[in-house]
Image (cartoon, grey):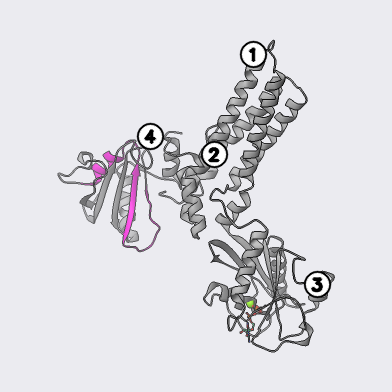
Amino acid sequence: MTVSDTIAAISTPPGEGAIALVRISGDNAIQIADRIFRGKEQPSKFESRVQHFLEIFSAENQLIDQVVLSVHRTPASYTGEDLVEISCHGGTLVSAKILDACLHAGARAARPGEFTERAFLNGKMDLTQAEAVIDLIRAQTDLALRSATEQLEGRLGEQIRRIRDELIALLAQINASIDFPEEGIEPDEDEALHTRLDSVRDQISALLATADQGRVLREGVRAVIYGATNAGKSSLLNRLLGYDRVIVSDTHGTTRDTIEETVNLEGVPIRLLDTAGLRASEGELERAGIARTQKSLQFADLRLHIADRNAPKPAHFNSRKFSEFNGTTSDPNEIVILNKSDLPENNDWKAFPALRISCVTGDGMPQLKQEILARIRQQNLRPESAIAINTRHRDCLRRALESCDRARTALGDGLSGEYVAVDLDQALRAVGEVIGVVDVEQILDSVFSQFCIGK
Ligand SMILES: Nc1nc2c(ncn2[C@@H]2O[C@H](COP(=O)(O)OP(=O)(O)OP(=O)(O)O)[C@@H](O)[C@H]2O)c(=O)[nH]1
Ligand SMILES: [Mg+2]
């Protein structure tokens, strides 16, 4: 990959706004800025990081906009290269024209995430920090934000480097025993190797254990609201969201498709899914909706099973599972809710253990929220630690753990050092992939393609 060609992009989202930002990065960034600004003021003469007020003209000599420009010289810039930032007025056309002028003057349109990719390639950050940039952009709750900022500061990278260092030291020790076979591995040294390897293994396992929390922080807990038609599923979604997102009506079968919205419960993002009500239906459309409900239940972290306490108990409550239901912990992933507590209770529900709420009056909602959080905590999904790995990290660390286990077995079986070294080397590589220190080419694309253009 050549890092020297000069890229440009609009870094702010499309649409109207007070300000838009156009960035240029690469060897010719400052030269290109000189070309698009006329007059005596040349960006190449500007001091680094000082903002200048300028007018920018199109190739046809038409005034495009009045802008604020700053030059950031290598290596003290986000990308580590020469970087020019142009803040213009936030119309779509203005920023597009400025970008056009940059491209006309010799820059190339940047790919998604290419600015951050360059920052990584130029050693400004490790791969976990680059990924934290996306997490930061996408964070929806304070907890997710905190986790992303800590990763951006390099906390995860630091832990990974520590593990790598220990693996390197272990490898050195094993290699020494291979190079000087006559000395072999002394029994007490052997013992020490075991202990060190176990410690590395424990550290990798501890990081792997944060994967679920990482998924929750990045994607949210998946909570599916389901139950018979007219139970108040859509009303519950609206109530938890705090506004009328979904159509509610007393017609059975109002909701036909699954509808997803995210709420923030004490810092934990909850992806709530409203579903088509369960009933025997003749309609093809509704049957398709019910099939979707069933599918979404398979991927739920938590199921909110809601029923209308004013109506007779639906048949599915009499299934074996529910006759065994004692209202406490029979299924940790399911909360049974009786809605419409403002209306009289049908005799079918007499002494039925469930949380009673009213989506109309709000009665029982605080208890429901606490119950949701308690279930999440039970499943260890509540993010407590700021470090939380993503799916890519998990894949690398799982491989590293397997290699460590193989090394451990080889060591235990008294195999020669070469075997142990091969496994440790594989573990080292897998751990290195997390921060991007080995064979990075193939993983870069998958990481940076998730970014927006201009970042
Ligand atoms: N009295 C009372 N009515 C409620 C309550 N919650 C919902 N309703 C009413 O019950 C009816 C059905 O509510 P929805 O939220 O549309 O029910 P749903 O489960 O989404 O129904 P489908 O989409 O048809 O499966 C509506 O007329 C709501 O106004 C409640 O707590 N008390
Ligand atoms: Mg509905």
Instruction: Name the element at disc 1.
Output: helix
User: Label 1, on which residue?
Assistant: 179
Q: Position of residue 375 (x, y in %)?
A: 66, 63
* Residue 166 to residue 450: above or below: above
Q: Nearer the viewer, residue 285 or 248?
A: 248
Q: Position of residue 57 (x, y in %)?
A: 23, 52
Q: Nearer the viewer, residue 250 or 147?
A: 147
Q: Nearer the viewer, residue 187 or 420?
A: 187
Mark 4 residue crowding within 10 angstroms, few (<14) / some (14–19) / many (20+): few
Q: Residue at x 65, y 56 (%)?
A: 380
User: Label 4, on which residue?
Assistant: 4
Say if the magenta span includes residue 88: no
In 3D space, how far apart are the residues under numbered discs 1 and 3 (Cα atoms)? 67 Å
Circles 1, 4 touching at the beta carbon (< 8 Å): no
Label located before the other in sequence (4 or 3): 4
The part of the chain drawn in magenta is: 9-37
Q: Which mark is residue 159?
A: 2
The picture quadrant where one finds residue 286 is bottom right
Q: Residue at x 59, y 64 (%)?
A: 271
